[in-house]
Image: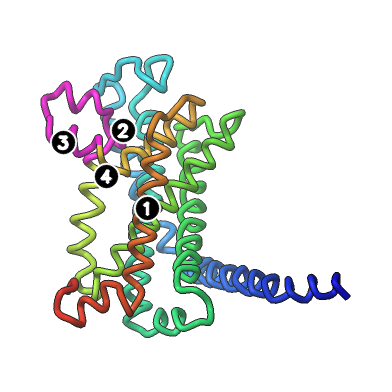
């Protein structure tokens, strides 16, 4: 009888966990199905980084000088240097694209319906975040394959593969969490483009995606160097870059994971109608 009681007591918890995982699977599956019907979205996600790789990097291949610096053990071509940054670009743009999708779903009433499900609100948002990360990683994988076909091969496979995957997953989650947080503040689709211009381009260009930190410091761009140094996107790119070559990324993993935690916690707080930014907006103190 005692054993039966223990099993019966555990059943509700087991059912609750199963229900939560089933809900996450449904949300991720819905996003994957929707993405599979949007061929233009995949093409546009690949065109941007491939243009940089095929045109910009080709023009600077023998002009842009790189001293031997970590994580590299020899001189490298410019396209090899910017390849991890272009992977980051794919993750960044899809993270911001997820923000647009959240705003659209909210305007159409789908988010309101989803958030009334009998599950913790944070779990629903985590499910959306996981779906965003899965799509980001799928697009990044396609880019790596296409980049290899055009002559830029990244050392993805080897003893460092688990570290590379960890860095990519954490970076995708961090940028997705940032998009989730931005969707709290963007009230209308018309405001999306302007907001993104103040997020995507500064994050990308003021980072190590296109040039190393020492190059910024050497050129005298002190304030750009400081911004890039504290830019979480810089640390996402550097984590992936160092992981590819099996080197220690320093503090970058902690900054990426810390930014992920802060952005997700703030987004979960913001989507709470009782205490979040939505409540502040109704009182006249929140974001427009």
Cα separation between marks 3 and 2: 22 Å
Q: Give me the disc on residue 57.
A: 2
- Taking depth in this image into account, of 79 and 213 the one nearest to the observer is 213
Residue at the disc numbered 1: 175
Neighbour tally class for label 3: few under 14, some 14-19, many 20 plus, Cα within 10 Å? some
Q: Position of residue 169 (x, y in %)?
A: 49, 48
- Taking depth in this image into account, of 108 and 260 the one nearest to the observer is 260
Residue at the disc numbered 4: 204
Neighbour tally class for label 4: few under 14, some 14-19, many 20 plus, Cα within 10 Å? many
- Taking depth in this image into account, of 12 and 127 the one nearest to the observer is 12
Front disc: 1 or 2: 1
Front disc: 3 or 4: 3
Q: Is residue 201 magenta?
A: no
Q: Which residues are magenta?
A: 206-229
Look at the image and tell me in which quarter the C terminus lies: bottom left
Residue at point 70%, 70% (across, down):
14
Compared with 185, 46 (above or below) is above
Residue at point 47%, 44% (across, down):
168
Residue at point 40%, 50% (across, down):
91
Residue at the disc numbered 3: 224
Neighbour tally class for label 2: few under 14, some 14-19, many 20 plus, Cα within 10 Å? many
Q: Is residue 215 magenta?
A: yes
């Amino acid at each position: 009888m005692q054993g039966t009681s223990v099993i019966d007591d555990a059943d509700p918890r087991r059912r609750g966990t199963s229900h939560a995982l089933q809900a996450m699977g449904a949300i991720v599956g819905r996003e994957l199905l929707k993405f599979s019907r949007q061929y233009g979205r995949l093409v546009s996600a690949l065109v941007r980084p491939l243009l940089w790789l095929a045109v910009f990097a080709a023009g600077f291949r023998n002009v842009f000088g790189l001293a031997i610096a970590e994580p590299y053990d020899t001189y490298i071509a410019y396209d090899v240097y910017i390849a991890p940054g272009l992977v980051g670009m794919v993750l960044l743009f899809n993270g911001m694209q997820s923000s647009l999708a959240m705003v659209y779903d909210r305007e159409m009433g789908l988010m309101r319906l989803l958030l009334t499900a009998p599950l913790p609100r944070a779990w629903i948002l985590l499910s959306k975040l996981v779906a965003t990360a899965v799509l980001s990683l799928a697009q990044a994988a396609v880019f790596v394959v296409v980049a290899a076909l055009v002559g830029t091969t990244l050392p993805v496979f080897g003893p460092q593969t688990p570290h590379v995957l960890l860095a990519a997953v954490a970076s995708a989650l961090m940028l997705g969490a940032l998009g989730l947080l931005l969707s709290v503040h963007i009230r209308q689709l018309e405001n999306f483009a302007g907001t993104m211009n103040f997020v995507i381009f500064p994050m990308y260009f003021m980072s190590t995606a296109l040039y190393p930190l020492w190059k910024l410091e050497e050129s005298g761009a002190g304030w750009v160097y400081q911004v890039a140094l504290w830019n979480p996107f810089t640390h996402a790119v550097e984590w992936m870059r160092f992981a590819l070559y099996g080197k220690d990324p320093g503090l970058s993993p902690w900054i990426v994971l810390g930014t992920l935690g802060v952005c997700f916690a703030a987004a979960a707080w913001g989507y709470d109608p009782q205490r979040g930014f939505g409540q502040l907006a109704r009182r006249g103190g929140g974001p427009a």
